[in-house]
Amino acid sequence: MNIKRTLPTLLVAAAAGLGAAPSQAAFTFDSAGDSITTLYEYAYAPGTFLSAQITYTLQSISGSNATFAVSVGNTTAAGETGTNRLTSFGVGIITPDLAGTQIDNSSIFTVKDGGSVDGNVGVVDFCATSGTSSGCAGSSSSGVTEAQTHTFNMTLRFVTSVTGGVTFDEPFYVRYQPAGSNGGTVITEGCIAGTAGCGGQIPEPGSLALASLALLGLGASVRRRKT
C-alpha cells in the first residue's frame, strides 16, 4: 500500500464558508486487507455540525476486478438541528480506469462508475448514491441517518488487468440532504485519516471568514510561484 500526499485544496470553497481543507492524499490498494478511512467535517450552521467517516477495505484483486468492503458512518451526533441524512459519497479519481461497478448487499446505495457532483467537486470517477438518482446526488428521502452506520460490498471492474494495485485519489466527498433547519444541501470534501491535518475539527461559521482570507492569500502565493 502507498499514500501519496498532495497540496491542500478547496481554497475558493473555504472563502464561501465550507471550512478549512485538510491535506488530502492518494492511496494505492495492492493487497487484501489494505484499508483507508476518509473523514469529513462541516460546520453548516449553529446547531448543525455534520461529520462522517467512510472506510474502504480491499477484499480481493483478481484479473480486472477488485472487491471492497465499504463502511459508511454518518457520525453527525443525533439531535443536531435538521435531518442531516448522508445521501451520496464518492472518489474523484480511480486508477486504472473503471469499466463498471457492482454492489452486493446494500439496502440503501447503488454504485456508479462516474458522474457529476454539484458545487466545487465536479466530475468524479466513482459515486455511491441512495435512492434511484441517475447521477451522484442521491435521494433526500433515503440515506444514512445521524449516528448510523451502513456496510456493504462492492466490486469495481477495470478496463485493464489490475497489476499495480488500485489507487483512490482526491477529491473524496460526501453529500447531506436535507441538512439544518432550512433543509439545505451540503457537499463537502474530506481527507484520508492519518495524513497531515486530517481529523481536526473545522471551526464554527463565525470563525471561517478569517481562515478564508488566509487560504486565499496562500492560493495567490502558490499561483505566483507557479508563474
Image (tube, rainbow, N blue to C red):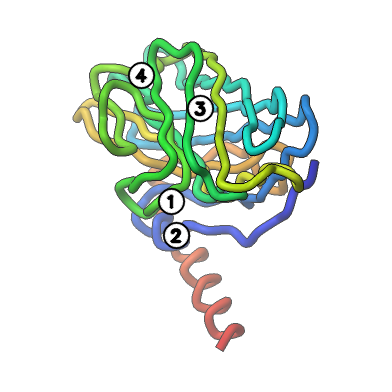
Amino acid under disc 3: Ala
Q: Residue at x 66, y 50 (%)?
A: 25
- Identify the mark nearer the N-term, 3 or 4: 3
Question: With 189 as the anchor, is 165 left or right in this view?
Answer: right
Mark toward the viewer: 4 or 1: 4
Q: Nearer the viewer, residue 91 or 174?
A: 91
Q: Name the residue under label 3.
A: 52
Q: Mark 1 points at which residue?
A: 208
- Under tag 4, what secondary structure? loop
Q: Which of 216 and 165 is in front in this view?
A: 165
- What is the CA distance from the residue labelled 3 to the residue labelled 4? 13 Å
- Under tag 3, what secondary structure? strand
Instruction: Tell me residue 165's x, y (percent).
Output: 73, 43
Q: Mark 4 points at which residue?
A: 143
- Taking 96 as reference, is 59 above or below it? above
- Under tag 2, what secondary structure? helix
Instruction: Tell me residue 134's x, y (percent).
Output: 26, 34
- Taking 190 as reference, is 59 above or below it? above
Q: Residue at x 67, y 44 (%)?
A: 161
Q: Does the rendering let one see residue 185? A: yes
Mark toward the viewer: 3 or 4: 4
Instruction: Tell me residue 224's x, y (percent).
Output: 55, 85
Q: Are circles 2 and 4 on residues that touch, CB within 8 Å? A: no
Q: Are circles 2 and 1 on residues that touch, CB within 8 Å? A: yes
Amino acid under disc 1: Leu
Amino acid under disc 2: Ser
In the rendering, which numbered label is found on residue 212?
2
Q: Residue at x 55, y 50 (%)?
A: 97
